[in-house]
Amino acid sequence: FEEKKRRRKNKMKESNDTIKIYCRLRPTKKSIKYAINQDFKGSSIELQRPKGGDLIDNTKELYRYKFDGVIDQEAKQEEVYQRTAESCVINALNGYNSTIFAYGQTGSGKTYTMTGGPMHYEERGVIPRCIHTLYEEIEKRTDKEYTLTISFMEIYNNRGYDLLDKSRNVKELKDLQKVEMLEDLSGNMLLKNIRCLPAKAEDDALNLLFVGDDNRTMCETPQNPNSSRSHCIFTVNIESRVPGSSSVTFSKLHLVDLAGSERVHKHQVSGSIFTEAKNINLSLHFLEQVIVALSEGKEHVPYRNSMMTTVLRDSIGGNCKTVMIATINPDPNQLMESISTCRFAQRVASVTQHAVLNKRIDPYTLIKQLKKKVSHLKERLAFFEKGDQEPKTLDSNERAVVHEKIRQFVKDEAAETLNLGGQFARIQEAFLYFKKMARKENLSLPQTVSEHKKETKSDTIPAIEHKASFNNDEIENLKTAVNLRDIEIDILVNMISQKNKNQMEAGVQTGGEYNVTTSSFNKDQFKNQITAKARFERENHTLEQKLAENHKLKNYTQAIGMVDRAQAFEHFRKSYRRNEVIEKN
């Protein structure tokens, strides 16, 4: 019970989690003083404001902010990915919506963190590494089938455009088809005029990333020579299922590179750059309003104020596991922008997510399974309804059809049922054909019931004989007891003969008559009997040894050597265990 309670608690904790925030410092030649502290609860960074010379300055000099992790300037791209994004990829494969977005001022390293540098392979950013991990994990999970589709969208001046649109190379931006937002009856946001392309391999996904990245709107600003002027959302749609199952697990992995905020009055920009900066700052302002409303628990959350917040509605405060990477520039001239970024990250960390496992029933697979079941039930119903109306025999064409179905059934290893149309004549023909195939292949057929009974009976006989068997010593003792009994019987017979002889002699002395033929005893007969029995035992080579060990057999050996009847009887009378009976007689 305690284990169940602990698991339930961990599940609740996992499903109601806050957004994880990480801070990454961009490498710079001139840097302010800062300190990174780590403990078992996380990490924190302390930014120290430079002093203003000899003048009195009462403003705050030390700013401290807590993060789930702080990544210093010397960190490599591999470390950044492993610490921030790898867990989100695994969650997406397991069926949870996941989002990773980079936020910070312009020129702080957001695009480099998300996409990477173009010079070296080791400089790959979060998005290429996420793609690699996705396909690597899918190869390991052989028990499921995965389907991945990719969309790439940018939000420029609060308008959405498809970065994978092939017409971008031949049309101006104002002539391109714009992405529209629609909402279904369940409140889910749908995007129109955006392509979702399949990616069967890692190379396909990377090609789509590079194509969209080339189509992204970029320009030179005073802060950054290659500044991104639009918010970019790279989405991977993942579906997985067990083969043959109608249950589908699905999720979305959003990888977001937000455009950088900048102070317009500070850099004195104008024209289209000024317009772009205004729209970028306005959309980030609406994003901050959403974060504040969620952190304070307000009933109304202004998602609809901008297209970016509407598209990322599930990623912020919804059904999603979200990670934010706050990029800051430790240059002294960018201190206030870095402080603003850290403050925004603190608000984001207070937002609670409600991630759930996304599952649905695939209607196409379910319909296919139901159709197959209905067809099977119709065949069974037709079989019972036909009764005696069906033909008793089949013609040659129908038999050929049955034989062909059986051959296909035998060849197909995955086949579990054989559809013969529900006619009894076809079923009978199928059994005959199976019998013919079995005899042709000389298969070992199963035994009949009678054969099985005979085999069972023959198997039980040795068990009975074994139960009645004796060892050699017991057999020898039984033989000896039988021989002793025979000797006792012979001696008793001789006693009766002696009694008859005495009566005959008495009759002769008194002149009476006695029938000599009634007496069947003589001395030679007794001698022959004793000698024959002794010879029988000596031929078995066991009696003499037994006689030497057994007292009764010793007496029996002595009796063998006595030829005279009187001596034999006298010895028997003394050694017999029931001597009193003999004395009485």
Image (cartoon, rainbow, N blue to C red):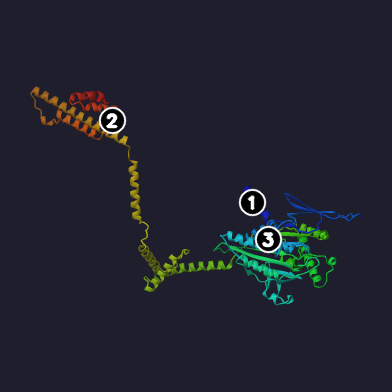
Q: Residue furthest right?
A: 55
In the rendered image, residue 279, in percent from the top left (x then y), is placed at 79, 69
| Mark identifier at residue 545 | 2
The C terminus sits in image quarter: top left
Looking at the picture, tell me which residue is in the foreground, 45 or 517.
45
Looking at the picture, tell me which residue is in the foreground, 429 or 227.
227
The secondary structure type at the circle numbered 2 is: helix
Q: Is residue 287 above or below residue 449?
A: below
Name the side, left or right, on which 451 lies relative to 500: right
Find disc 1 in the rendering and name its residue.
Answer: 7
Q: CA distance from mark 1 to mark 2?
A: 80 Å
For label 1, the crowd category at 10 Å Cα-Cα, with few meaning under 14, some 14 to 19 and many 20 or more, is few
Q: Residue furthest top?
A: 509
Find disc 3 in the rendering and name its residue.
Answer: 122
Q: CA distance from mark 1 to mark 3?
A: 40 Å
User: Does label 1 or label 2 sit earlier along the sequence?
Assistant: 1
